Amino acid sequence: MADIEITKMSSKGQIVIPRGMRKSFRDGEKFVVIKAGKQLILKSTDDFDKNIEEDLEFARRTEEAYKKHERGEYISIESEEFLKKLKKW
């Protein structure tokens, strides 16, 4: 499952990668930034060519899920009930 956190852009266009998400990266590591509509994808240059199509699809689906959540289009259930439903899948 993906980690999701919220950050913001400064007046200089800088975006902070949350501490927990940057643990596996090293200082000075280079990234490719891909803009697809209103989505930004940040990808290490070390594995840029791997799974780019999957990354774009994941970004599209994540944006759609976030929009649905903002519109209140979700179901809230207790964790035990969720786990029961998950087992049925």
Image (cartoon, rainbow, N blue to C red):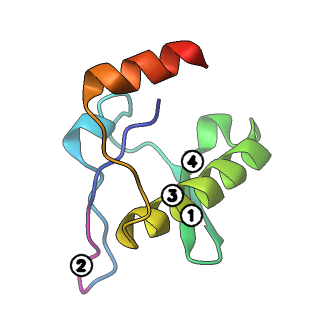
Please say whether residue 9 is one of the residues in the magenta stretch.
yes
The circle drawn on residue 10 is 2
* The residue positioned farthest toward the bottom in the image shown: 11
Question: Is the magenta region chiefly helix, strand or loop?
Answer: loop
- Examine the rendered structure and indicate whether residue 87 appears above or below residue 8: above
Mark 2–mark 3 distance (CA, rounded to whole Å):
25 Å
Residue drawn where x is 34% and y is 24% of the image: 81
Seen from the viewer's position, the closer of residues 33 and 69 is 69
Inspect the image, locate mark 3, and give the three-letter code of the amino acid beneath it: Ala
Inspect the image, locate mark 1, and give the three-letter code of the amino acid beneath it: Glu
Question: Which residue is identified by label 3?
Answer: 65
Measured as percent of width and height from the top left, residue 56 is found at: 69, 54
Question: Which residue is identified by label 4?
Answer: 43
Mark 3 secondary-structure assignment: helix
* The residue positioned farthest toward the top in the image shown: 87
Inspect the image, locate mark 4, and give the three-letter code of the amino acid beneath it: Lys
* Badge 3 vs badge 1, beta-carbon distance below 8 Å: yes
Specify which label sits upstream in the sequence, 2 or 3. 2
Question: Which residue is identified by label 1?
Answer: 64
Mark 4–mark 3 distance (CA, rounded to whole Å):
21 Å
Mark 4 secondary-structure assignment: strand
Q: Which residues are magenta?
A: 7-11
Q: Quadrant of residue 29?
A: top left
- Examine the rendered structure and indicate whether residue 46 appears above or below residue 59: above
Q: Nearer the viewer, mark 1 or mark 4?
A: 1
Residue drawn where x is 27% and y is 58% of the image: 6
Please say whether residue 87 is one of the residues in the magenta stretch.
no
Mark 4–mark 2 distance (CA, rounded to whole Å):
20 Å
